[in-house]
Image (tube, rainbow, N blue to C red):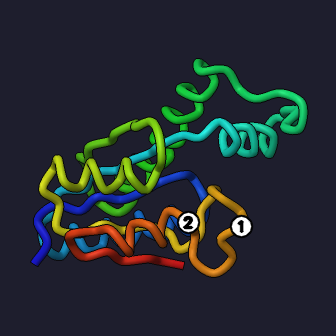
Amino acid sequence: MFSKITVGFDGSKPSENALRLACDLAGKYAAEIHIVHTPKPETVAFATGAVSGYHVATTMPSAEEVEKTAKKLLSTAIEITKEAGLPSVATHIEHGDPAQSLLDMTEKLGSDLIVTGRRGLGNLSALVLGSTSQKVSHLATCAHLTVS
């Protein structure tokens, strides 16, 4: 049913749940998993601050810190896939709007399913459905599954 699954991952609990579900589906359908992370400086600052006392209100992370954090988050994602019994997955670090990055990567790869967390670390003004999930849901040309 699914041959390529693109998963949006920002390190939030819903994105971890989305990845776990995508791994389950990949196992059932022998599908490829492609994990896409599009770091945003404000979410990197939040994640870094939560871990190391980073001064979020006064300092935004440098490009190097954003890249380092992105790689660390993708390492976490790879560990989740290994725990799920998937030894090999592809990871992608994109730039720009997370929803558009997911949509573009899905199109480029020819994925037939996008899996996202219902709410991630993005725009806090989207209260019910995260802005990334909402945009992907409206614009996806393939199946889109949101996970709590």
- In front: 92, or 25? 92
Q: Is residue 15 above or below residue 53?
A: below
Q: Earlier in the sequence, mark 1 or mark 2?
A: 1
Q: Position of residue 97 (x, y in %)?
A: 48, 47
Q: Can you tell which mark lies on residue 125?
A: 1
Is 58 above or below relative to 33? above
Secondary element under disc 1, as helix, strand or loop, is loop
Q: Is residue 7 left or right of residue 141?
A: right
Whether residues under marks 1 and 2 lie with C-beta atoms below 8 angstroms apart, the answer is: yes
Cα distance, mark 1 to mark 2? 8 Å
Q: Quadrant of the N terminus?
A: bottom left
Q: Is residue 126 above or below residue 93?
A: below
> Does dot 2 land on a helix, a strand or a loop?
helix
Q: Is residue 59 above or below residue 141?
A: above
Q: Which residue lies at the image location 49% right of the left edge and 32% below the top edge?
A: 71
* Residue at horizontal 33 percent and vertical 41 percent from the top: 91
Amino acid beneath label 2: Ser
The residue lying at 80 percent from left, 45 percent from top is 50
In this picture, residue 84 sits left or right of residue 43: left
